[in-house]
Image (cartoon, helix red, strand yellow):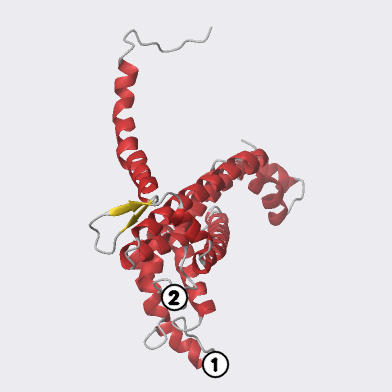
Amino acid sequence: MEKRVTFDNRLLPYLLLLPQLLVTIVFFFWPAGQALYQSLLLPDPFGLGAQFVWFSNFEYLAGDRYYLQSFVTTAVFTFFVTLVSMSAALLLAAMADQVIKGAGTYKTLLIWPYAVAPAVAGVMWLFMFQPSIGVLAFYMKAAGFNWNPILNSTHAMTLVIAAAAWKQISYNFLFFLAGMQAIPRSLIEAAAIDGAGKWHRFRTIIFPLLSPTTFFLLVVNIVYAFFETFGIIHTMTSGGPGQSTNILVYKVFSDGFVGQDLGSSAAQSVILMVVVGLLTFIQFRYIERRVHY
């Protein structure tokens, strides 16, 4: 017979849940409600009052080509950051999972970049690739490559993608390595005895068994690219050149705090919240079907 823990005091479970509920209400539901309310207002230029305009802010955004362009920019940025960071982390985890000399030091060094703040990571990469004084930019120019992320939108997008992906590789590496080490060695050894090579073992045994980890990291990396890369964009390009790196989360900041268009900024934040929620729902609704636990 299955034994279950029961509480004689009916109030106790609610008291245990109360701290977490308060944190969720104060730091999520209340700000989300304020953003939704602000999106229906049009503040005056001096911030002394606001006019209730219903959905005019959303209608304005639907016709703003710069805002619609930021959707495409965000999609490209998110796709490549997720692809590069997860692919590189999977490769490094596969190498670290081998029995090699100095494996502990190798793993420790790979974890360090995760401790770097996004803004600091952006400054580091900008300093290395700055066209005038960057060390790596100097060698690129010496090799005949005209590198200039300040004026070239493709170079700027490539640079912010590289910096954002580098920042996230350590996080993905930890989970991929833990997933690989949890796979029973007997399965891999049996496949090796049957004559399966390393690539065949990885493709047919290791990677399918990593599907729960891969799915989890896919969700986390998409959310990371949407929200946590603000510091990288802000320190490296400020959305330029020509708004070519102006992703959705940075446009919320630039329109609200720089342009002082608080109504439009609030509407953008609501749309961003809905977009990320829909993406997460689609992933759990359709992609998780292919995950084998």
Q: Is residue 108 visible?
A: no
Q: Is residue 140 visible?
A: yes
- Judging depth in this view, the residue of 139 and 33 nearest the camera is 33
Picture disc at residue 74: none
Q: Looking at the image, how many numbered discs can be counted on the residues?
A: 2
**Residue in view at x 35 percent, y 72 percent:** 123
**Residue in view at x 45 percent, y 85 percent:** 137
100 left or right, relative to 138: right
Please determine whether, in this image, residue 105 is positioned above or below residue 131: above
Alpha-carbon span between mark 2 and mark 1: 24 Å
Q: Mark 1 belongs to which amino acid?
A: Gly
13 left or right, relative to 157: left
> In this rendering, which labeled residue sits more in front, label 2 or label 1?
2
| Residue that carries the numbered disc 2 in the rendered image | 240
Q: Position of residue 173 (x, y in %)?
A: 49, 54
Q: Position of residue 25 (x, y in %)?
A: 33, 36
| Circle 1: element type | loop
- Judging depth in this view, the residue of 280 and 173 nearest the camera is 280
Picture disc at residue 144: 1
Q: Residues within 10 Å of mark 2 (few under 14, many from 20)?
A: some
**Residue in view at x 37 percent, y 66 percent:** 254
Q: Mark 2 belongs to which amino acid?
A: Gly
Please determine whether, in this image, residue 33 is positioned above or below residue 199: above
Q: Residues within 10 Å of mark 1 (few under 14, many from 20)?
A: few
Q: Position of residue 264 (x, y in %)?
A: 40, 58
- Judging depth in this view, the residue of 103 and 182 nearest the camera is 182
| Quadrant containing the C terminus in the rendered view | top right
Q: Earlier in the sequence, mark 2 or mark 1?
A: 1
Q: Position of residue 222 (x, y in %)?
A: 51, 53
Please determine whether, in this image, residue 30 is positioned above or below residue 48: above
Choose top left, top right, bottom left or bottom right for residue 189.
top right
| Circle 2: element type | loop
